[in-house]
Amino acid sequence: MPQPIRLKDHEKDASLVRRRVIVGAVVVVLLTLTLVARLYYLQVIQYDYHSTLSENNRVHVQPIPPTRGLIYDRNGVIVADNRPSFSLTVTRERTGDWQSVLDTIVEVLQLSEEDRAIFEKRMKQGRRPFEPVPILFELSEEQIARIAVNQFRLPGVEVVAQLVRHYPQGEHFAHSVGYVGRINEAELKRLDPVNYSGTHHIGKTGIERFYENELHGQVGYEEVETNARGRVLRVLKRTDPTPGKDIHLTLDIKLQEAAEAALGGRRGAVVAIDPANGDVLAMVSQPSFDPNLFVTGIGFNAYAALRDSEDRPLFNRVLRGQYPPGSTIKPAVAVSGLEAGVITPDTRVFDPGYYQLPNYDHKYRNWNHSGDGWLSLETAIMRSNDTYFYELAHRMGIDRLHDYLSRFGIGRKVSLDMFEEAEGLMPSREWKRARYRQAWFPGETLILGIGQGYMQATPLQLAQTAALLANHGKWIRPHLAKTIEDQPPVDENPIPDILVRDPKFWDYARNGMVQVMHSARGTARRVGETAAYHIAGKSGTAQVVAIRQGEKYDRNKLQERHRDHALFIGFAPAEKPRIAVSVMIENGESGSGVAAPVVKQVMDAWLLGADGQLKPEYVPNAPLENLDGQR
C-alpha cells in the first residue's frame, strides 16, 4: 500500500530560514565589528607608526656633501681645486643582482677585468643604505652615451655630476700638499658618519690629511619626495652644506720650481725656511709623483710601479728620510760646547790628521789626513775639522751632548702641521741600553760630535737647525699653512727657545759658517766666491756603508747607491737672515761640491732680483767682519 504524501510544512521552513538569517546576520555583524575594530586599531591606535612608515616610503633625507676647501700657494696660485666630473654611481639596493649589473657595465663600456675588480671592491666597502656608490669617474661623452642607451639593462645605475679633487701643479707639491683618496674601512670607523654622509674621499697625506677637518666642511641635507622607483619628484626642504675652508700655504711655486731645477733630477730633498716666521718656502722631495692618480683610484699596475720603484717616488724624503747629519751639525755642537763651558772661542786643538782617546790605540780620522795643525773654534768650523770636534764631544760627554742637541730639534718632531714627520734619533745612554742592552762607549760620543754614528736627522730638522742658528736660538716651528680662511695657524705647544749665557756664542758659530763660504781656506769657497751676498753655510757627508780602520773611501769600489750622501745647510744674508736652506742629495758624496751649489741656487732664486742684485728689502744694515779665518 503506498505511503501517504506529506504536505509541505511552511511554518517549519519559515522558522529554519529565520534562524539562518539571524545566524548570518550575527556573523556579518561580528565580521563587520571585527573589521571596524581592526580599522580602528590600524588607523587610530597605530596611526603614528603607519603614518611614519608611509612617510618614509615617500620622503627621504639625502645628504649634500660639502665642497672641499681650495689650497693656494703664498702668491694665490691654486695648487688644489675641485673640478666637475661625470661619475657613474650604483645604488646597491636598487640593482637586484649587483654582480650581474657590474658585468653589464664592464661589457657596455668595454672595460678590463682589473676595472671589474676595482668596482667590486668599492661596492663592498661600508656605506649607508640606499647611498649611491661612485665606481667610475671622469666619464667621457662616449661612455655617457653608452650608459644612456643601455639604461634599461642597468637598474640602480646613474650618471651624476660631481666635484672631484684636482691638482693642477701635478708633481710639484705631491709631498707637501699630499692628495685625497677614497675612504677605506679603517677610516670609516673613526669618521663622523653623519658629517661624512655622501662624501667618498678624504685627505690621505700632507696638508690634505693634516687639515682634513678644516678642508672638509659640514654636510647639508635635503628632504625629497620620491616615487615607487626611488626617483626624486620634488625637494621638500633643504639645508645647505657649509663648504670647507680655503688654505693659503707658505710655499712659493717659483722657488719650488727653482729648487727642483737645482736638484737636476737627482734623488734628494730641499727645504727652505724663512727664519723670521717659520714659513716653509720650498719643500722638495725627488723623485716625485702625480697625486691626481690617487684621487679617483689608481690601478694595480700603476701603483705597483710606484711602490716597487728603486728610486722610491712615494717616499717623502723631507719628512720621513732619516740620515746621519754629518758635519752639518758641527755649528750646533760648537754653540753647545760654548754654553756648556767646556771650550771658549779661543780654545785651540792640534790636529795631526787623527784623534786618539787617552790609553786607546784606535785612530779617529780627520777627513784631511795630513791634518790642519792648531785650530780655534771658528777655524775648525771653516775647515770642518773632525779632530777638533772629536775633542769637543769628548769633553762634553754623551749626556750633555744629548741634552744640548735635543734643544736644536734632533730626535724630535719640529713642525707645526706636517703629519708624516719622523722624529729622527738623538741617541743617549738610556736609548742604547734599551735598544741594544749595551753600555755606551766613549768612541760613540766622538763620532756623534761629527754627526755620525747612531744620530739620525730629517732634512726638515736640519733646515730648522740652520734657522735656529740664524735666529740665535729663537724657536719658531716650521709650518706649511700661512692662513686658514684668513686666520694664521696657532702653535698651541711652542718649543722653548735655546738660551745661552752669552749671545756672542751664536756669532762665533755664524762667523765660522761664513768663513766656510767666503774664506780662502773655506771648504765651500768655490761656491761662496760667486755669491752676491754673504752666506753662512756648513757642508756634511753622511756615510752609507762603514769604512774599515786604515782604509780610504774609494768611490770606484762602491756601488752608486752605497756612496756617501751629500748634505749642506746655510742661511743668508748672513748679517740679516731671510732664508735658511738644507739640502740632502742621496749618494752625492760631496757636501761642498754637490749640495752647496744647490743651496746657493735656491737662495739666489729667493734673494736676488731680475738684475741679479740683492733685493732692497734683503740688504743688510751692516757688513760682516773677520772673514779671513784667522781668529
Image (cartoon, rainbow, N blue to C red):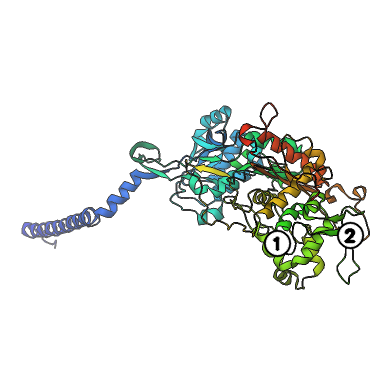
Mark 2 or mark 1: whose residue is earlier in sequence: 2
Q: Residues within 10 Å of mark 1 (few under 14, many from 20)?
A: many
Q: Residues within 10 Å of mark 2 (few under 14, many from 20)?
A: many
* Residue 426 numbered mark, or none: 1
The nearer-to-camera label among 2 and 1 is 2
Instruction: Tell me the element at label 1.
Output: loop
Distance between mark 2 and mark 1 Cα atoms: 25 Å
Q: Judge by depth and name the residue closer to the eye, 267 or 76.
A: 76
Image quadrant assignment for residue 114: top right
In the image, residue 73 sits, relative to residue 464, either above or below, namely: above
Q: Position of residue 595 (x, y in %)?
A: 78, 43
In the picture as drawn, the residue positioned furthest to the left comes out as 11
Q: Position of residue 600 (x, y in %)?
A: 74, 38
Q: Judge by depth and name the residue closer to the eye, 155 or 59.
A: 59
Image quadrant assignment for residue 397: bottom right
In the picture as drawn, the residue positioned furthest to the top comes out as 611
281 displayed left or right of 625: left
Residue type for callout 2: Tyr
> What residue sits 35% from the left and 46% below the top?
57
Q: Is residue 153 visible?
A: yes
> What residue sits 64% from the left and 33% below the top?
254
Residue type for callout 1: Met
Q: How many marks?
A: 2
Residue behind mark 2? 354
* Residue 379 numbered mark, or none: none
Q: Position of residue 201 (x, y in %)?
A: 54, 45
In the image, residue 156 sits, relative to residue 419, either above or below, namely: above
Q: Position of residue 556 (x, y in %)?
A: 92, 47
Q: Judge by depth and name the residue closer to the eye, 470 or 603.
A: 470
Q: Is residue 299 visible?
A: no
